[in-house]
Amino acid sequence: MAKYYDIDDIIMEEELFSVVFQVGANGVGLLDPSAETNNIEKGAKVELPFWLAQELHLRQAVSVTVPACFNQKTRKEIQADAPCVDLRNRCPYFYELGCKVAPLIGDRTIGSFLLYAFTGRYKEVLSKAHSAAFAVAPKFLTLLTKEETHLYEAARSSMKAFKKWRVGGPRFEKASILKKRKSAE
Amino acid sequence: MAGQSDPHLSIFSSAEVEFLAEDEMVEIVPNISMDPLNLLCGNFGPFRPQIATEVPMWLAMALKKRGKCTIRPPEWMSVGKLTQVLEAERDSPREFQPLPFHYVEISRLLFDHAREDIPDVYMVRSLIEDIRDVRFHKVESGLETIAARTHAVKLKNLSAMEVNIVRPFFVRALQAFYKHDSPQMIHQPDTSSRRPQVADRGPRRDLRPR
């Protein structure tokens, strides 16, 4: 409930999962674009958003397949060179989704995989965030997931604020509305 | 307001930390005669020409701006002392030298308002910049050691401004590691019998062993 209004949480649950229906379902043909009737047959493979797949899975109506960002291929890539893997492209909410998927499908390796990936990528974020505070590295930024971007931005903006303070300048800033009025005159 | 902090980022903005630093005491030599000031935060004065007295930074700045005093730079702000500190900082890559908690802010305030009272102001300024850079580099290399089992970090002798700069990043990083390292994620989730989470999970890591 704490995350009920969290926009990131909502967007994250929109992530599509491919599921296989274990039971036939009537009147929900719109979930399956390829369905000819308004029914979904048993064994049909359908893409559903996570929030729906989760509920159906708990009622044992569907079986969830592990999404691509947690499959063996991605794991191999993370093991090879974690910072260079483009996780944003695969799933911008990689870590959050991983935390939700792991208990759902009962895969205990996902937890340690997430930790491993984050540890590997954390160092890269750290070194880029403070040192390259001004020379922005746009290419590097496009690889980061949402959580890593937040981390990077937190470091960068605090460094920027400090540099601004140190350089000095006017101690009192005019409210932007006042500036506007003056220029209009 | 200009100095207000961004609620999402850190608890204090740089200007707010500077405001806190203005309560530090500094020695001034007044050139006016004035009765003691009896304020809520203490009694300061009496002010007699050429007789040194201790006042808080904010009062010293106010008097200085009106040309009513000269400020005696604190003891640690001398070229000799700072050179010593800088060498010690460079020699010991794993610990911080004791400096005043608000050294970054105090030095900036003095450079802004009382440059003519500091001997060798350029030298002092560049020394303090160097010290800050060396120390910040140490903080960064310390941050690299954060890993899965880190739940608390001890930083001895770190100054207010340095803590303030790394705080947003640091808190987020620790939170992320904490989340991904939680027992429910690593081990098989035990949903049938919800046992209370163990409060202490592994040893705390000292970022800077003494």
Image: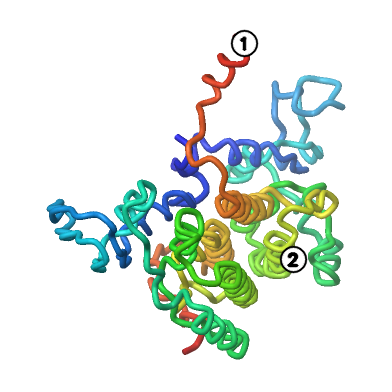
Residue A28 position, x and y percent, is 71, 24
Residue B49 position, x and y percent, is 24, 61
Q: Amino acid at mark 1?
A: Ala
Residue drawn at x 68%, y 48% is: A146
Residue nearer the viewer, A149 or B142: B142
Q: Choose the circle earlier in sequence order: 2 or 1.
A: 2
Chain for mark 2?
A
Q: Which residue is mark 1?
A: A184
Q: How is the image coloured?
A: rainbow
- How many numbered badges does the structure rendering display? 2
Q: Which mark is residue B114?
A: none
Residue nearer the viewer, A93 or B125: B125
Residue drawn at x 56%, y 88% is: B88
Q: Amino acid at mark 2?
A: Glu
Say which quadrant the N terminus of chain A sits in: top left
Q: Which mark is residue A124?
A: 2
Residue B102 position, x and y percent, is 42, 66
Residue drawn at x 63%, y 58% is: A102
Left or right placement of residue B55 versus residue B81 in this view: left
Neighbours of disc 1 within 10 Å: few (<14), some (14-19), many (20+) = few
Rounded to the nearest angstrom, the CA distance separating label 2 from label 1 is 47 Å
Indicate the secondary structure of the residue bearing disc 1. Answer: helix
Would you identify the image quadrant in which residue A37 lies?
Answer: top right
